[in-house]
């Protein structure tokens, strides 16, 4: 054993290639060499637009998908190719919360059954599991007396609390939350965000928080990773990335978010990107962002920039030939 | 600022749906105006009645719905107008775009054919002229190589490009009013910025009136001149955009603004969430629909609380910034 403990989650060169939809179409590299760590008790935000590979990354980490290449290590142990049987004890520690609470809960089961199910799978007795389910309902702000109701009797926000209670049932240390609040009404989102923050404090959870909403991610995470077309283009402490984005894509993304403040909106300088995110089935050569990048030069069209430290003495990394704030540009 | 006669005027609009559990009033006594060349933002959560309102204005509600009240476009009453007449007005004078453009486009016809068809129906233009107009329209909404793309099918377009196609189609007949129902909700944020920019440009160039229906207060802050906040099928507050964001009078508006995580904010305190969830329209509360979740009602005296839960507040308050609340928070005004 070395003196430094491994991080809770270590992801290295994680890659997912899906076969093309038709026999002769090219395979799609949805995730392309993604690496990051999540320490115990830490929240890493994973942001990006649709098709950037953030959800696929999350699914590989909880092993709903088996990666094509690269590794996922949990607590120092490589889990990327474990069999379902070998994974079972790990399922206790690694849980997932999904976007649409209603479609991720079985409509025919009672809340008691939904929340207790992971415990039953892990070998608890029915009575124990039911008691624990009631405790968990209380913990996430639901009324334990509602334990025998069905999901449709709950609002969207309450249903998401059920999903969170189920994820917490086995006492996990890491929760991968894939867009946990984006299907909820605005007035309810804050409740669930506050709940997740409280649970994290009280239970010492680590989150991989996957979302497209940059304002929500800024609120909940310690560090943030920005993905574009299957790769991380910038990763670092939230304060640095949000206050001084180094990648032109991060800058554009932040400047595109509408602020709930009309005066600020009028005063704001926006970087409007041209075009749409390209398809991962046919990624552009060189830096995949170059066709939309306001700063692209010749080298960007031919050479993919590696993810590297943005400035000496800084932990933040960026994959850009000409990152912001490093030279006279 | 230009013409102050409203282009669209809605008075006491009420939409009721019969259901197995009795009639549901999805929109209740709603009134608002849209001035020429201006954008009205209608904000609300699920079940607030914002989308039903837009469908009723265009006469696109389902046959089962009962619509009462008055909707006038340039002085002409639309409620009760025969379908044939309405058809002529839709597209020609008013048009609508939706959240999901793919479901509003026909998969078997090229994009160019669909826009051209629209033009032929409304103007009786010849096939070739209509085709030409379609290509022009695609160019105007920023679709590169419009001539080539006019020959492609909807599935060949990305989400953002499809929404541009919908806008091109909506604007091909040069309507005066565009109703946009969550037009950017399904789009990525960088593409959303492009579409909002496009609508703003078209408004500047053509003096278009826009009704922007959204759940996103950021979108409203960016595009709207005036804002109508809806809750439980009714107007909660109606104000010019700056007044609404600087000094919201209704506790619901205040609560929404306070509960938002913001990019331009510090993150050290918990968000001030609104408790509970949006109301069910099936059994509306007798008093204010927001009362069960309202911090103002909760902080009030017993007498005040009884008023909030027992008596429905009417839209009132200063001219230009009314709110439907018994205890609105107008600055410097005792309520």
Image: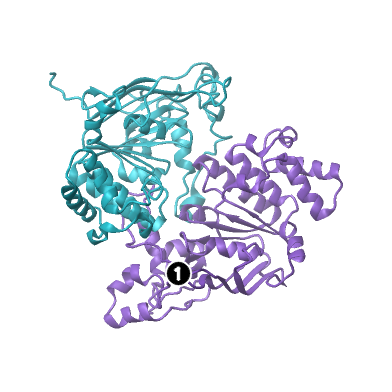
Chain colours: A cyan, B purple
- Image-quadrant location for residue B1: bottom right
Q: Is residue B226 something one can see in this rendering? A: no
- Residue A151 vertical placement versus A287 (above, below): below
The front one of A132 and A279 is A132
Q: Is residue B114 something one can see in this rendering? A: yes
Is B68 displayed left or right of A201 in the figure?
right
Is B211 displayed left or right of B308 in the figure?
right
The front one of A315 and B272 is B272
Q: x, y (%) of residue B105?
A: 66, 46
- Residue A113 vertical placement versus B238 (above, below): above
Output the chain of dot 1: B
Q: Residue furthest bottom?
A: B303
Residue occupying the point 46% across, 73% down: B323
- In the rendered image, which residue does mark 1 sit on? B282
Is B183 displayed left or right of A9 in the figure?
right
Q: x, y (%) of residue A259?
A: 45, 50
Instruction: Give the SS element for disc 1.
Output: loop
Mark 1 is surrounded, within 10 Å at the Cα level, by few (under 14), some (14 to 19) or many (20 or more) other residues, namely: few
Q: x, y (%) of residue A7?
A: 22, 28
Q: x, y (%) of residue B195?
A: 59, 45
The front one of B125 and B212 is B125
- Residue B259 vertical placement versus B106 (above, below): below
């Amino acid at each position: 054993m070395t003196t430094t403990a491994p991080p809770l989650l270590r992801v290295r060169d994680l890659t997912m290639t899906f076969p093309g939809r038709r026999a002769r179409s090219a395979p799609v590299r949805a995730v392309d060499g993604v690496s990051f760590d999540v320490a115990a008790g830490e929240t890493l935000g994973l942001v990006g637009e649709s098709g950037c590979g953030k959800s696929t990354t999350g699914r590989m980490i909880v092993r709903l998908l088996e990666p094509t290449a690269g590794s996922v290590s949990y607590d120092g142990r490589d889990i990327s190719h474990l069999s379902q049987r070998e994974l079972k004890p790990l399922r206790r520690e690694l849980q997932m919360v999904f976007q649409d609470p209603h479609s991720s809960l079985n409509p025919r089961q009672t809340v008691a059954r939904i929340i207790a199910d992971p415990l039953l799978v892990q070998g608890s007795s029915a009575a124990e599991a039911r008691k624990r389910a009631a405790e968990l309902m209380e913990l996430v702000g639901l009324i334990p007396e509602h334990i025998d109701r069905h999901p449709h009797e709950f609002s969207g926000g309450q249903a998401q609390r059920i999903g969170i209670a189920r994820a917490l049932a086995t006492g996990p240390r890491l929760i991968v939350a894939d867009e946990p609040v984006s299907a909820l009404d605005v007035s309810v989102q804050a409740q669930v965000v506050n709940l997740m923050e409280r649970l994290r404090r009280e239970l010492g959870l680590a989150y991989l928080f996957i979302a497209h909403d940059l304002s929500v991610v800024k609120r909940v995470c310690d560090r943030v990773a920005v993905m574009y077309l299957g790769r991380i283009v910038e990763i670092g402490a939230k304060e640095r990335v949000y206050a001084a984005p180094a990648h032109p894509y991060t800058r554009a993304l932040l400047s595109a978010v509408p602020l709930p403040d009309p005066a600020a909106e009028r005063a704001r300088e926006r970087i409007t990107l041209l075009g749409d995110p390209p398809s991962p089935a046919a990624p552009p050569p060189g830096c995949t962002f170059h066709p939309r990048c306001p700063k692209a030069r010749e080298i960007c069209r031919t050479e993919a920039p590696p993810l590297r430290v943005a400035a000496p003495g800084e932990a933040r990394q960026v994959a850009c030939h000409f990152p912001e704030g490093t030279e006279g540009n | 600022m230009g013409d102050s006669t409203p282009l669209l005027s809605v008075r006491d609009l009420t939409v009721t749906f019969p259901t197995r559990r009795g009639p549901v009033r999805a929109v209740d006594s709603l009134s608002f105006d849209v001035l020429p060349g201006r954008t009205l933002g209608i904000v609300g959560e699920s079940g607030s009645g914002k989308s039903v309102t837009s469908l009723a204005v265009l006469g696109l509600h389902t046959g089962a719905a009962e619509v009462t009240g008055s909707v006038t476009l340039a002085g002409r009453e639309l409620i009760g107008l025969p379908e044939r007449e309405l058809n002529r007005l839709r597209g020609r004078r008013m048009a609508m775009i939706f959240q999901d453009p793919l479901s509003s486009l026909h998969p078997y016809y090229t994009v160019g054919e669909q826009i051209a068809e629209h033009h032929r129906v409304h103007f009786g233009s010849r096939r070739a002229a209509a085709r030409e107009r379609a290509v022009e329209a695609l160019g105007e909404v920023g679709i590169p190589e419009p001539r080539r793309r006019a020959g492609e099918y909807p599935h060949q377009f990305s989400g953002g490009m499809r929404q541009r196609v919908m806008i091109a189609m909506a604007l091909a007949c040069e309507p005066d009013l565009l109703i946009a129902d969550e037009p950017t909700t399904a789009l990525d944020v960088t593409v959303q910025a492009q579409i909002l920019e496009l609508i703003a440009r078209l408004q500047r160039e053509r003096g278009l009136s826009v009704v922007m229906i959204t759940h996103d207060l950021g979108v409203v802050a960016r595009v709207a001149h005036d804002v109508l906040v809806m809750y439980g099928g009714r107007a909660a507050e109606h104000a010019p955009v700056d007044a609404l964001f600087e000094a919201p009078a209704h506790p619901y508006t205040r609560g929404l603004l306070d509960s938002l995580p913001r990019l331009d904010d510090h993150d050290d305190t918990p968000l001030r969430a609104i408790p509970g969830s949006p109301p069910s329209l099936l059994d509306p509360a007798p008093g204010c629909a927001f009362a069960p979740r309202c911090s103002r009602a909760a902080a009030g005296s017993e007498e005040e609380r009884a008023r909030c839960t027992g008596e429905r507040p009417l839209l009132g308050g200063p001219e230009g910034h009314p709110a439907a609340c018994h205890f609105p928070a107008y600055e410097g005004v005792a309520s």
